[in-house]
Amino acid sequence: MNLFENMETIYLTIVLAPLIGSIIAGMGGKLIGRNGAHRVTILAVGISSILSLIAYYNIFYNGGEIYNATIYTWLNSGNLHFEIGFLVDQLSVTMMVVVTFVSWMIHIYTIGYMHDDPGYQRFFSYISLFTFSMLMLVMANNFLQLFFGWEAVGLVSYLLIGFWYKRESAIFANMKAFLVNRIGDFGFLLGIAAVLMHFQSMDYIEVFEQAPALAEATVNIWGDESWSLMSVICICLFIGAMGKSAQVPLHVWLPDSMEGPTPISALIHAATMVTAGIFMVSRMSPLFELSETALNFILIIGATTAFFMGLLGLVQNDIKRVIAYSTLSQLGYMTVALGASAYAASMFHLTTHAFFKALLFLAAGSVIIAMHHEQDMRKMGGLYKYLPITWITCFVGAIALIGFPGTAGFFSKDAIIEAVHLSTLPAAGYAYYAVLSGVFITALYTFRLFFMTFHGEERMDKHVWEHLHESPWVVTFPLVVLAIPSLIIGAWLGGPMLFGDYFAGTIQVAESHNVLQEMGHHYHGEWYAVAWQFFVHGVFKNPVVVLLALSGVFTAWLLYIKFPDVPEKIATSLGPIYRILENNYGFDAFNQKVFAGGTKAIGKLLWQIGDVKLIDGLIVNGSALSVRWFSGVIRQIQTGYLYHYAFAMILGLLFLLATFVVFVYKLI
Amino acid sequence: MLAELPILSLLIWGPVLGGVWVLYAGDRQEETVKTLALMISVVTFLLSTLLYKDFDITTHEMQFVEFAYWIEAFNINYYLGIDGIAMPLIILTTFITVLVILAGWEVIEKRISQYLAAFLIMEGLMIGVFSAVDAMLFYVFWEAMLIPMFLIIGIWGGPRRVYATIKFFLYTFLGSVFMLVAFLYLYSQSGTFNILELQDLPLEAGVQKLIFIAFLLAFAVKIPMWPVHTWLPDAHVEAPTGGSVILAAIMLKLGGYGFLRFSLPITPDASLYFDTAMIVLSLIAIVYIGFVALVQQDMKKLIAYSSISHMGFVTLGFFIGFSIYAATGSTEGAVFGLEGAMIQMISHGFISGALFLCVGIMYDRVHSREIKDYGGVVNTMPHFAAFMMLFAMANAGLPGTSGFVGEFVVIVSAYQANFWIAFLAALTLILGAAYTLWMYKRVIFGEVANDNVKHLKDINSRETFILSMLVIVVLVFGIYPAPLFDAMHPTLEHLFGQMLQSKVGQ
């Protein structure tokens, strides 16, 4: 088949099609109308998606070569080259498929969700632009383009969170998201600067090849203390990941980002953009493997996020916020896997999570449409009768999220927990208990959401109740399409991704950290054999995780179906703790007061004292005053008599002559 | 045939004479005058593109050279020429002038011909500054160029224009007097005003320091560097939109140009001696002014402070080279830093110009620059909001826009000298985004705040055209800055060679 002969054209088309779609929908929105806008963007992303699948097939089943080439040179300076280019290997092609496929489904879903919105074309333009940016990020073959895509997805996220720009809460949330991400980017940029300085290159492959030689290198950053170069680079880069992938303490923007329309929450803030940090660290595994300090740091941050953000999911009443905190917690799991050097497990969870979390968000969106844009779960209940497809697909998403045996989440989450258990890094102990207890919490908040929404008493008002009906096919179709991989993709991909050579050489793990290889000793054979052995192991031999998940579901059933009065009482009796959770551990209040307030106070101080009082008041106007005084003196001389002036002129001439003579004399 | 033309002289005297013609035509036929001025500026711009087309990017030597004896007694000559530093700045000047002429189209109500003439004459004089190879010629253009600017602020300015003009005048005049003294001293030592010869003149360390300080006073005021920056916010606030645009886009660059043309090559030892101080002042500009910008209530003031902060990257890029060389032993990083500073100048010309135009567009409709008088502008001016979003993001240094290139290059270069310099400079990522987006949020987003906003009309085709032109250059230089770097590289490489060449004890 000569389809695979010209892969460069295919890769370029994958990237550029969504960009072109976005430009057409954005600039020509009025001209092509609403239908035109969704047709052109869905077509463009569809092309990307199908071509990504072809690329995937080419690399995995057709023995296609890894593509690594420059598209054009951004700039040259001496021997420094900055280029735009693509690296398409097992890792990036997996991300390309996930990104374009989820994005395609969400494009279709948007037709239904944004049906009545006046900004219809603008919305399609934005989500296509996002797809382009995300593809630039994952397909980059160098740090510069990575940063380009990194910031571009930040921009689109900003535009989309503030999509409903009249809402004060939305425009606050989008600015917050951008600024918090910028704090991460600040670290990220310093990391890139360090890479450029020490490797004299931005190209991934060149950097990775040189990395082992610099493993022992040190730098002096503070006084004479020497720090490991790799630790500095990796921690700086990871700070970037903490911003994008919403890890504590840079997680604060993600819950607020739910102000954006639901398809965005699904596309950007669950399935794709927030996983950029996870992807980046996996991509940089040859660097991170050289710094145990960085890996320990990652473990602690990830575990803290996984456990403590999960707890917050328990006290939310807004259906989207529950899923948002769940996303934070699951991102914590992925981060923990990175810290344990189980990059493949992290990428695996990223993939499964992309499907079932997008599914959950879209299901929530379907509920929100039915409820006339009511998002408070306390006003829902018993919806299973009215929204059967949403109910079933949401159930699929929920069991996948809690890791019910056999579903996608079961394989990916168990793998992470096992991997952390096997890790020998000092922080792994803390991380293990955090992610293990996180399983119970995950199950509890997930089924709390499920029961409060679809079961129990119908608590909505009469008007809403009368109009309850299932969403149109453009909404339910993506739900069904996403539900299928949520169920089966874990069993299918688990074996090859975790223990096989799925990622080939793209992810590198040091021998002493290789926990997945250690796990892999127990599993043999084709993907179905491995899946079965894994299933048996997780359900019968070592069922702790599954039992924790099931007890979480059972607790949720007790609290929200059987004894619905109990949660209220628990909340009252645990007053202070409950309030801490409700206030997000005080992060928002602290940031608002100390960072936002402090910055403004410093700005006022510097301006009023520095500029206005000192520089202008004392120096500038001071000298102006002395000039006035001086001119007052001079004015005495201006008498108006011609002979006075003539006299002054002669004096002046004499003075000039004298100076001139002295000057010339000196020259001679 | 084109190569035979004295292009630089045409670029200087064309607009000056054109300005006189416009002045002579007077205000009677307003449309004719406007069209005439526009034609002159467009022809000048087209002519200036020849400079790029025929530019030899392999050499640092002066190109398009013109020479004529002027005042032979003092060896002052009419000597013009450009290199990789001057060429982009001249094209920036001619490009921005076209937009400024267009921007004043319907807005200026009084003395339109004088207004347009002032800009045309100023354009010619600014090109003169960038292309003079003779120090006295440079000085004449430098001083002459200020006169139209004083007039623009003084006649078409806001209510406190007299205060602003006097402050502007005092600051800049004080600076240039010292520069003149330095020139005269250098002449007394060498018998020439030829800048290229002055660059090779041996000077003792103590003398170099004095000359450096004399130059610094002139150029630091223009850029402006902290703490001699306070004239800028006042001048911007009072200046009409066109004046602000020229001020931000081109006049500030004259200071940067001065450093590259005079301070660094003529007094390299003193530049090395003072480099820590200069780096500290640049970082203060970036961080301190970033904080100050955050709390401004007046949009023009905010953008003025943002300009000062962005120009901090220019001076940082200029003076970081010595430390990079000391730390790495390679000239490459240092040259890269200089290139970053140069592209920051060009890019800042586009972005700050665009932002001042945006504020001008709102001011023309509402007659207020206060942030609190706006809110929800996107509801009534969606197209305008989209343009301003792009410029705001460019101002915040978003990759893909020209605003990113300079900041990125200077930060990664600074990292090679010292982690903490890069750390402080990179704070602009947060501060720049904070002050720009916070202003954008309060002005553009939200519900319609008041009746003025409710009755706003979206931008017309003339305004759309102006902003579109700027969008194109901001994106082109963000996505493909390579041609600019290629054009500058030999010149800046040569310049850094000069900076490393000690002049003491030769």
Image (cartoon, rainbow, N blue to C red):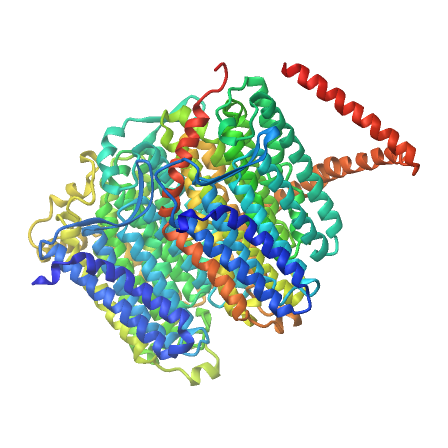
Determine whether, in the image, residue B475 is placed left or right of residue B111. left
Determine whether, in the image, residue A626 is placed left or right of residue B244. right
Residue situated in front as seen by the camera: A254 or A198: A198
Residue A100 is at least partly visible in this image:
yes
All told, the count of numbered labels is 0
Please tell me whether residue B121 is drawn above or below residue A212 in the rendered image.
below
Please tell me whether residue B79 is drawn above or below residue A583 in the rendered image.
above
Residue A658 pos. (x, y %): 76, 20
Residue situated in front as seen by the camera: B75 or B108: B75
Quarter of the rendering containing residue A152: bottom left
Determine whether, in the image, residue B423 is placed left or right of residue A237. right
Residue A119 pos. (x, y %): 45, 73
Please tell me whether residue A443 is drawn above or below residue A206 in the rendered image.
below
Quarter of the rendering containing residue B223: top right
Residue B283 pos. (x, y %): 54, 36
Looking at the image, which residue is at 55% across and 64% down? B445
Looking at the image, which residue is at 44% across and 55% down? B473
Residue A142 pos. (x, y %): 29, 45
Residue situated in front as seen by the camera: A49 or A533: A49
Q: Tell me the quadrant of the picture where the N terminus of chain A can be found.
A: bottom left
Residue situated in front as seen by the camera: A240 or A248: A240
Residue B399 is at least partly visible in this image:
no
Q: Tell me the quadrant of the picture where the C terminus of chain A can be found.
A: top right
